[in-house]
Amino acid sequence: MSINVDLGLAGRLAAARAGALVGRDSERSVLDRMLTGAADAPLVAYVHGPGGIGKSSLLRYAAAQAELAGREVVRVDSRFLNTDPRRLEETAALACVEPGAVLLFDNFERSQQLEPWLRDTFLLRLGEGAIVVLASRIAPDAEWTLDPGWAQVFTELALRPLDAVQSDSLLATRNVAPDHRAAIVAFAGGSPLVLSLAAAGEPTGEVLTTLVERLVGDLPSDAHRRALDVLAQAHVTREDLLRAVLGDEDAATVFSWLRRQPYVETTPRGLHPHVAVRSTLAADLRWRDPERYQEVRTRISVACLSALRRAAEDDAPQRAAEWMFLFRDQAGPPDLDDWRAHPHVEDTPLDSADIPHILRMAGESAVAHWIRRQPEGFRVYRSAGRLLGFMAVLRLEAPSPDDLAADPVIAALWKHVEAVAPLRQGEHLGVRRFAVQFGGHQRPSPLMDLIGRRIVAAEMRTPGRAVTFTVFHDAERWRHHLAAAGLHEVVTVEADGLRQHVFGRGPRSADLLPRKAFEKGVLEALRTWRAPREFATSVLLRSHLVPQGSADPVAHLRDAITSALDALRVDPAGVKAHDALTATYISASGTHEATARRLGVPYGTYRRHLALAKERLVAHLLAR
């Protein structure tokens, strides 16, 4: 971009700002038509969008163009007004007497309660040929378009995030090197403000503070700040998630506030923040309070896992996706990092009519054997009635000779398990044996994303599963990402002309802790349940309750204890044990004497129940 050196400072600033106003051609065209008095041009333009999206930049553009056209510019900044209409009248008085004046309102959300009065009273007093541009974080009142008169002269300009090409172009105007732009574009989420500030380098604490203030504005209370901490890390935020993470805070009030914010999208599954807001809030909290950042992450993980366990079968993959979102940075190749739902793809159980198509698609003789043996382990994926692919997760307790003869991959894997870590009573293996799609068995795709969700959902919801293995054909594509998740190649087999690689975790760490240390760790976990950060030093992190290589060992540990508590609740002999433990530690709100009164039992009886409950909980956890 070149700037005429003969311009004065004001002119050079205006030219630079116009050059940096990327991706707003249609909005600028509307303003240009208004300023030239085109017959079909509106008289009032209402610009709206979240903080940092470029509203003020458009107002500056309108002001510069108006001054070039010789029009009088009247600027009103609602940050410096109160709610008294007379104050606004005084500030904007010139627009009522100056023909052709251009009245510009910035930060109008601060005066939003005056919108009906402005529309129905004040704007009717403007001088001949005047035009108005309002900029607000809040969308306009519907009355502008419901009224047949205003509908003829009013237009709404909703500013959207810049796309990747536009974002790259803006960075180019800031002289950012091409090889640095992709990371900034990903962080900024199309926000011109974030792009501009990030162009100066890695955001510092001071820059992050400025971004938060500009993107989200003033916050009513600390509870609202904590709600934003959740919004920044959770895939979707619902009221029950806020309640689980914030504890005693008024979840209903802050949820209602969140859904009204201009940087939050309301969807059928919950609230999504604008990408730039998510990135900035998360980075700010991580810089400002690393312990709080990790605590919120842990609580969201625990709440998501709990929701996954309770979910109906059809809803489980979506709940799995919400938990997996927390680990998206290490979840897989970039082309798999798509955490949106794929409603156009159906995930259904195997139907007998699907079998001929699956057998033609498979390319492996073992598929037919496992369809006969474990049809319930297969899921089929189709779109608009067309079969796209299938997957199968097998449950293996003790494969039969026929199983081992029909499938050399399972035969080799079973030999490995028997030699390294034989199954104990009540345990079984999970094996993702097949994952097939048209055009390439295991290439990254939305379909493979859905299959991954289904597998994680099954892993988290299936009691007695000792470990899960996954069979890959294209191991080199996935090896690095699997290693990052603690999964390593354990068996390689030639079958049906294919070289097949089986990945899983190492031998289970069942006996890393002596029983006494294990029991002590369980009791300490109960005592510190309401302080999740204490779990970071728990001896139980070295127990079999936490999978080796876990990306979030604290979440796995809390989930294991919660599962054991749930098991007590469904055990007829353990109902009182569950109630005693839950009332004492999980929802603790007083002394043991107060807890006994709340349970409606004598204190001595309560103490006996509690002692037996601890024993039963330890037994359940050891049995895992």
Image (cartoon, helix red, strand yellow):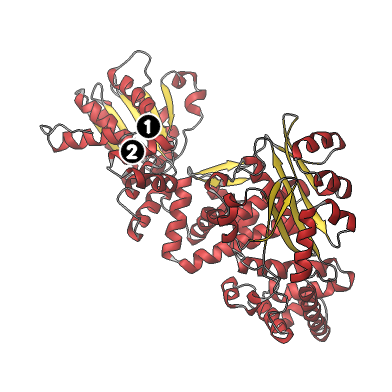
Task: Locate the C terminus and report the quarter of the image it occupies.
Answer: bottom right
Give the residue drawn at x 41%, y 48%.
183
Element at badge 1? loop
* Residue that sits furthest to the left in the current view: 6
Is residue 581 left or right of 174 when viewed as pictured?
A: right
According to the picture, the residue beneath numbered tag 1 turns out to be 23
Give the CA separation, mark 1 to mark 2.
Answer: 9 Å
Left-right relation of 187 to 467: left
Where residue 358 sits, quadrant-wise, is: top right
Residue 181, position in %: x, y?
A: 37, 44
Is 487 on the left-hand or right-hand side of 206? right
Q: Check disc 2 and give the amino acid type.
A: Leu
The percent coordinates of residue 164 (x first, y second) are 43, 38
Among numbered discs 1 and 2, the one appearing first in the sequence: 1
Q: Is residue 66 left or right of residue 152?
A: left
Q: Is residue 77 visible?
A: no
Q: Residue at the spot x=37%, y=56% of the render?
A: 208
The 10 Å Cα crowd at callout 2, few under 14, some 14 to 19, many 20 or more, is many
Against 605, residue 163 (above or below) is above
Please give the residue where the numbered disc 2 appears in the rendered image.
170
- How many numbered marks are there? 2
